[in-house]
Image (cartoon, grey):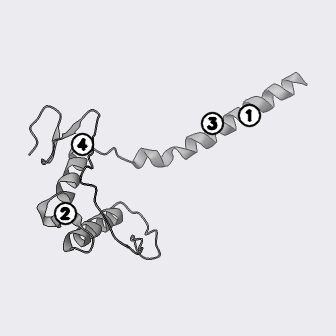
């Protein structure tokens, strides 16, 4: 009887490994994001052309289209019917003049008022 239990356990373990191995197939097609790609996105989204991306401006529309186009090229399906945009009423906004952002980690350093740069290089 112990021999039968051992065989069942080995079979179940092998089946579980095959199932788990099959789940990882899609990950092989995903390529890692590079620092240069992230920097290019940040550079465009923070450019003067987008006019600060304030609500109701041409800049926010350009940024929204940029994201939509990127989502399409990545093969993502729209999450809101036929649209990537989630609409909602905005009752008002009040930016915090003391707000700040700190990013720590290897690879990218962003200086206040400047574009992204690799650590050890000048931002520009």
Crowd class of label 3 (few under 14; some 14 to 19; many from 20; radius 10 Å): few
Query: Dot 2: what SS?
Result: helix
Mark pair 4, 3: CA separation: 34 Å
Position of the N terminus, as image quadrant, is: top right
> Distance of mark 4 from mark 1, alpha carbons?
44 Å
Looking at the image, is mark 3 or mark 1 nearer the viewer? 3
| Residue visible at 73% across and 35% down in the picture | 12
Query: For this rendering, which residue is in front, 91 or 37?
Result: 91
Give coordinates of residue 4: x percent, y percent.
85, 28
Please give the label number shown on residue 110. Answer: none
Is residue 120 found left or right of 97 in the rendered image? left
Mark 2 Cα-neighbour bin, 10 Å: few <14, some 14–19, many ≥20: some
Q: Residue 119 appears at what percent x and percent y?
A: 17, 34
What x and y, as percent, mark residue 88?
42, 73
Residue that label 3 marks: 17
Alpha carbons under labels 3 and 1: distance apart: 10 Å
Residue 114 position (above or below residue 62): above
């Amino acid at each position: 009887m112990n021999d039968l239990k051992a065989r069942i356990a080995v079979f179940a373990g092998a089946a579980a490994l095959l199932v788990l191995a099959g789940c990882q197939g899609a990950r092989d097609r995903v390529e890692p994001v590079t620092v240069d790609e992230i920097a290019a996105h940040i550079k465009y989204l923070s450019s003067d052309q987008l006019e600060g991306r304030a609500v109701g401006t041409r800049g926010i529309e350009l940024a929204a289209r940029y994201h939509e186009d990127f989502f399409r090229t990545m093969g993502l399906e729209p999450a809101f019917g036929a649209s990537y945009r989630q609409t909602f009423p905005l009752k008002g906004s009040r930016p915090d003049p003391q707000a700040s952002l700190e990013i720590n980690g290897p690879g990218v350093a962003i200086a206040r008022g400047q574009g992204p740069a690799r650590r050890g290089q000048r931002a520009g």
